[in-house]
Structure formats: structure tokens, C-alpha cells
Image (spheres, helix red, strand yellow):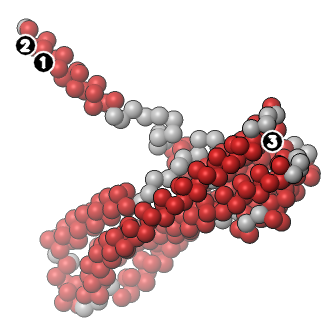
Amino acid sequence: MTALMAGLLTGTGLFLIWSSFWVKTASSERGPAHLVLRMQDTVAQAGMSGVSLRQVALSAVVLSIFAGGIAFIFIPLPILVFLIMVGSVYAPLALIRARARQNQKRLRQSWPEVIEHLSSAVRAGLSLPEAVAQLSTRGPVQLRPAFSDFAADYRVTGNFSASVDRLKLRLADPIADRVLEALRLARDVGGSNLSALLRNLTSFLHDDLRTRGEIAARQSWTIAGSRLAVAAPWLILMVLSTRAEAAQAYRTSTGTTLILVSAAVTLIAYRVMVKMGRLPTEDRVLR
């Protein structure tokens, strides 16, 4: 009985220690609503605010059917045609994510300039709405359309808080969330520390950009080589499958199983490579 109780207590303790590493927080949950919000942010970050998720899904289905039809003409191997169709479904999402990452990288480099403009405008005595609206003509070129929309919203409504909410929705950026919430708080409650806060945020962003640049420069060739190593065998297989004798060899149950297992291993290896090689991104906790 004593040994049984000791075993139960030991097992319970080990389970509690293990489960403590997997506690879900509000920012780490991956429910359907969270995934929809993440996808909406990705579409907005890619500069495609007018595109709905339904349109993205429809484009993925159309592209899959089109790619499958083209592959069926040149590749007489049903299992490979099926994998091409499955991969084509993911292609629009992959392109949107790649475009969003490129836009976010450029925007991240622009935010120190935006904050410096805001700090100068505040020190010059401009009101916060005027300082933000001024960025539509004096801010970074890629951010001017968003701030032009803010200026138009504020002229129409006169509501700074509502205009800030719409600007956050257009930018869908965690740095923008922090800056705009600091401006909202300064306008609502006042205070003389806004300039110091903006200076500290600028210093933090410069340090973050420098660190990310150094890490990305070291990892870029590794990631490029890994992608080439993943894609090369499948390109060779598609070329070989255009030959009747090679396609016949893979039409057997053994060949089909080999292709499916290879696809699963390739997918797992690619996801692990991306997870290990990609720099962490900041969640939008102030959306």
C-alpha cells in the first residue's frame, strides 16, 4: 500500500511538472477564432485589406484545380498529381504570408522614423491628432496611405480614439499598437512623459533591428539551402514521372506508399526547419 501511494504521488508530481510547461495563455491559444484573427492580420499586413478570407479560400481552390489539370496533362502519375493539388491549396496562403513578412520587415525599419517625427511634432507644440495626421505627408512613404486615411477619418468624425482603432486595424502591427495606445493614453489622461516614452521606444526598436539583422544574415544561407534540399528531390521526381516507364514503376502500391511517406517526411522536416530558422514574431496584445 505504501509503495502504491508513493508511486501515485510520484506520478502525479511528474505529471504536474510536465503539464506546467504546456499551460495555455490567452496569447497562445490556437482556437478557430484566434486563427481567423491571425489570418485577417496577415492579409492586412500583406497590403490586401480589401480581400476577404472567403476570396483567399476560393483562389486556393481554383489554383488547386488548375494546377491539378496542368499536372495531369504532363505527369501520368495520379498520386503525384494529387500531391500537387494539395500543395497548390497552400500556395496562396504561402504567398500572402511571404508578402506580409516582407512588408512587416520594411515597416519595422520605418517605425523609428515615425516615432522621431511624432516626438518632434509633440515637442513643437502640435496636438496629438495633428502630429499623427502630419505623418501622411512627412512620414515614411509606405506608411503615408494609412496615416492619410487616419487624417480623413479624424476630419470627418473628430473622434481621436475611433480613428486610432481604424488605423490599428489597417496597420495590423504590434509596434503600431504600442505607439498608438501610448498616444491614446497621453491624450486621454495627459502627462509630460510622452516624449521620454517615445525616445525609449525608438532606442528599443533600433536595438531590435540591429539584432534581427545580424541573426537574419547568419541564417539566410542556411534556410535557402534547406529549401533547395527539400524541393530538389520532388523536382527530379516530377521530371522522371514524365517518362512512361518511370511513372509505371511508381504506380504500384509500393511506389505510392513510398511517395506518401516521403511527402510526410518532407513536410515534417520543412516545418521543423522553418520553426527553427524563423525569428520569433511579436503577438498583437494591444489590438
- 245 or 221: nearer the viewer: 221
- Give me the C-alpha separation between circle 3 and circle 2: 64 Å
Determine crowd level at label 1: few under 14, some 14-19, many 20+ residues with C-alpha closer than 10 A: few
Up the image or down, 248 lies above or below 227; here it is below
- Give the amino acid at mark 2: Ala
- 84 or 103: nearer the viewer: 103
Q: Residue furthest top?
A: 1
Instruction: Name the quarter where the C terminus is drawn.
Output: top right
Residue under the point 66% across and 58% down: 112
User: Which one is in front in this view, the residue at disc 1 or the one at disc 3?
Assistant: 3
Marker disc for residue 3: 2
Q: Which residue is mark 1?
A: 7
What SS does tag 3 mark? helix
- Give the amino acid at mark 1: Gly
Judge left or right: residue 177 versus residue 158: left
- 262 or 98: nearer the viewer: 98
Q: Quadrant of residue 225?
A: bottom left
Q: Which residue is mark 3?
A: 161
Q: Is residue 184 visible?
A: yes
Q: Is residue 36 visible?
A: no
Q: Position of residue 37 (x, y in %)?
A: 58, 48
Up the image or down, 142 lies above or below 184; here it is below
- Give the amino acid at mark 3: Ser
What SS does tag 1 mark? helix
Q: Earlier in the sequence, mark 1 or mark 3?
A: 1
